Each structure stands twice: as structure tokens, then as C-alpha cells.
Image (cartoon, rainbow, N blue to C red):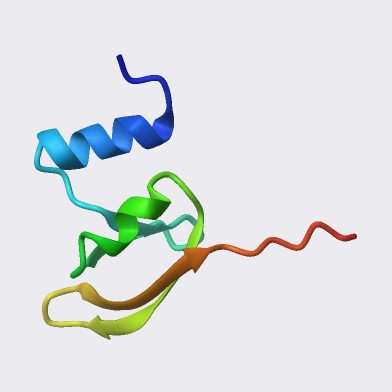
Amino acid sequence: MIKSERNCILACVNFDGAKFVLYNPETKHIYELDNQQKPEAFAGQEVTVTGTYDKDTKTIHVINIRPRVTNTGL
């Protein structure tokens, strides 16, 4: 049984052939990621990805991924 969003994502990637992508909700654009190992630790989280974008393949060459820092106002 899949009991969390994270587990659902990991099951789709590991067993159904899905790929990790970066989704920008402001632009509603999906970005392919060239590295499929780095995003696994952040499945289902909001993240900041550092890398370069290849317009021809529409893929981000991932250099780094880190959890998104949110301003809590404290």
C-alpha cells in the first residue's frame, strides 16, 4: 500500500518507468531532469534546483538540489 505522496512518487519512478521532473507552479511548466538519482531524496518536496537548461532537449543538467527555504516571517 502506498501511504504518502513521497511513496507514490517513488513507486511510479521505480516500478512504472516515470521520471523525476521539476514543476514550476507559477509558469505551469515541467522541466525534465538529466540526473534521476539526485532528486530521489527530495521526492514530493519543494526544492531549488541549480543547473543549466538545454533548450534543444528541454532538460535541466542538474548540478545541485536542495530543499526550498521558505520565509516563515519569524
Q: Looking at the picture, how far across and down is residue 66, in whole percent?
A: 48, 67
On the image, which quarter does residue 70 sit in? bottom right
Residue appearing at x 48%, y 49% in the figure: 45
Q: Is residue 10 left or right of residue 42?
A: left
Q: Which quadrant is home to the N terminus? A: top left
In this rendering, the answer to whether 3 lies above or below 10 is above
- Pick whichever, 72 or 58, lies toward us: 72
In this rendering, the answer to whether 13 lies above or below 37 is above
Residue appearing at x 32%, y 58% in the figure: 39
- Pick whichever, 28 or 72, lies toward us: 72
Q: Which quadrant is home to the C terminus? A: bottom right
Residue appearing at x 16%, y 40% in the figure: 14
In this rendering, the answer to whether 68 lies above or below 5 is below
Q: Looking at the picture, how far across and down is residue 42, in whole percent?
A: 41, 53
Q: Looking at the picture, how far across and down is residue 16, in whole percent?
A: 11, 34
Looking at this rendering, what residue extends furthest in the right direction? Answer: 74
Residue appearing at x 37%, y 53% in the figure: 41
- Pick whichever, 73 or 26, lies toward us: 73
Count the numbered circles shown: 0
In this rendering, the answer to whether 11 lies above or below 2 is below
Q: Is residue 55 left or right of residue 64?
A: left
On the image, which quarter does residue 34 sit in? bottom left
On the image, which quarter does residue 63 sit in? bottom left
Q: Looking at the picture, how far across and down is residue 21, in whole percent?
A: 28, 57
